[in-house]
Structure formats: C-alpha cells, structure tokens
Amino acid sequence: MARSLVFLFLTVVGANVWAAPTLTIYTYPSFVSEWGPGPAIKEAFQNQCDCTLNFVALDSSVAILHRLRLEGESTQADLVLGLDASIMADARKTGLLTAHGIDTSPLALPITWKDDIFVPYDWGYFAFVYDTEQLAEPPSSLEALINAPDDLKIILQDPRTSTPGLGFLLWMRHVYGEQAPQKWQALQDNILTITKGWSEAYFSLFMNGEAPMVLSYSTSPAYHMAVDNTERYQAVAFDEGHYLQVELAARVRTSEHPELARQFLEFMLTPAFQAAIPLKNVMYPATDLGEQLPDVFERLIDPPQTLYFEPDAVAEGRKQWIDEWLNATAR
C-alpha cells in the first residue's frame, strides 16, 4: 500500500513538472469556429511550441476589451487577438498590454504601421454586400445609398457592440464630417434593422433574404466564390472610398508565459498562420502571400480611396459620434 501511494505521489508530481504550458488567447467566436482559422492555427502552433493553445471566444472584439478591463491584472489571458485599430487607443490606456518585441517588417498593409504593442494579423475594407438576385443595380456611393428609395433596405450593426458597426460610423464621419448627423437622419428610412453583431446581420438576416444589402467587408464575396462556388453575393465599390479595418493582437503584461506569447505573435506573421486568413477569416493577410493568395481575391472590388482615422482621433471623437448616431436612430 505504501509503495502504491509513493508511486501515485511521484506520478502526480512528475505530471505537474512536465505538463506543457497553456497559452490562453481571448478572441471572438468566428475566429475559433469550425469554419474559421482558429482550428488550423491551433494545430500548426502546437506542433512547434510544445504547449497547449487555449482559445477563449468572447462575444465580439469590443467584448474582448471589456473582459480585459473587468479582469484587470487577474486576467487569465496571455494574449488578446481580435481588437481593431478603432479601439486600439482605449486598449492601450488599460495599461494591461505590453510591448510585442518582434520584427514587424514583413507587414504589407495599405498604411504604414509602427507600433510597439499591437501586431496586425489581417486587414480589410468595410463594404456593403448585396444579393444580385434581389438587387440588379445597387447604389454606387454613400450619397446614392442615403438618397435611395425607402424600399431599398439595408442591415447595419450597432457601433457600440460591433466593430463593423463602429467602422461604418467612422466611414460616415470621414466622408461627411460635421454633416454626418444629418446624413444619419436621412439614411433612417433605408435601415431595416441594426443588429448587435456581424454574424446575426449577415447569416441570420441577409443570407435568409431579409434585405438585399448588408454592412460587411469587401472580402466577403471571396468566401462565396471560392467555397460556395457562387457569384450571387458581391460587394459594391463606393465612389467616396472605403474605411479600413486592421485587426490586431497583443501580449498581456501579466502573462505567466511572456516568451511563449511573444513566439505566438512572431508565428502570426509566418505563412503557417497567414495562409489560413484569406478563406477562413475572409480578410486580406497582413503579409504578402504571393501566389498563395487565392485567385478569387483578384476579383474583389478595389476601393478608389482608403479612409482611416488614427486611433487617438477615434478615441477622442467616438463618444460624440456615437451620441450623434443615437440621436438620429432614436427619432
């Protein structure tokens, strides 16, 4: 009996000593879904890290920031993956994130990127996707959309809970400046509904034919063309240009595995990670994949102008701009 207890004790101690570390990453649901990039990325990183990757899916990018703030220095997260540039300044102000310490020279973005905390892993343009079987000639500008007949309905997302929703808020503000509140008011009759998040708007409503247009990304048609083998759903290029989204990851300062977290950020910019982005996260990769970029990406719209606010400008103006949106939508 005594020998058995000693053996059990040594077995337990040995298991604890040799247990592989677990790297916990807060992210959003579509990233870790069955059809998202998470499963392939988890397998590829685990094959080289001698560790376990633990993705924790929260409601949205905004929810990741809220969870981090709520947990503070007691957070279990080693990394956050899924913030975007529009909430980057607020994330930095938490003081909970730390320098990435990696070489970001492989980045290939539409804008110059220099930041010591946040590492981009993909990017895309916000755009309206339309159903060609419901709408033969979609509006080709924001102005045309705002002045469209009332029976042309669109589906939007809430800028308080959704990064596409916030992206459209910034898009409107970039194009119309101080005239944005009046333009929001003029758009109201064309809005079928405003959802909490992108998935509800796109999959639950748009794909079920509830409206012919939905706020999404210029890259969304790539999935339909490459995976569904249909050209039914297309994005429309707007004359004013399109607002840019850059998705980001960062290390948490209190992580018990800082070197492993740094290794994951480094891994993010390798082909093993980036090749999973175009058709699984349906965005442009953050590095140049060359011939590995799926051919369907050559058939996507090419916005005539990239619209983008610096993160500090968004942080400064966001509350006022959301209040203007709330006033318009409440009428």
Image: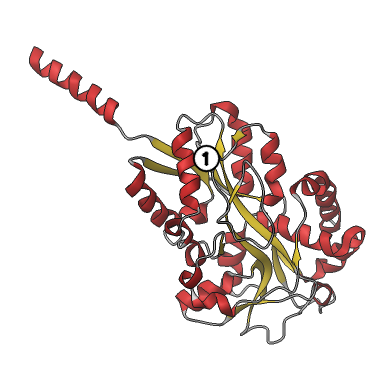
Q: Pointer 1: residues within 10 angstroms few (<14), some, or many (20+)?
A: many
Q: Provide residue 56's location: percent of width, then percent of height.
A: 48, 43
Give me the residue at 45% from left, 56% from top: 273
For residue 218, above or below residue 107: below
Give me the residue at 54% from left, 44% from top: 102
Give the residue at mark 1: 79
Image quadrant occupied by the N terminus: top left
Give me the residue at 84% from left, 49% from top: 323
| Colour scheme | secondary structure
For residue 237, above or below residue 29: below
Image quadrant occupied by the C terminus: bottom right
Q: Secondary structure at mark 1?
A: strand
Of 181 and 245, nearer the camera is 245
Viewed as shown, does residue 249 lie left or right of 87? Answer: left
Q: Provide residue 283's location: percent of width, then percent of height.
A: 56, 64
Q: Provide residue 304's location: percent of width, then percent of height.
A: 74, 74
Place residue 136 in its image quadrant. bottom right
Disc 1 marks which amino acid?
Leu
Residue 1 seen in this snapshot:
no
Residue 266 seen in this snapshot:
yes
Q: Provide residue 308's location: percent of width, then percent of height.
A: 75, 59
Of 113 and 65, nearer the camera is 113
Give me the residue at 61% from left, 32% from top: 96
For residue 83, above or below residue 229: above
Viewed as shown, does residue 111 lie left or right of 249? Answer: right
Q: As drawn, which residue projects farthest toward the top?
A: 2
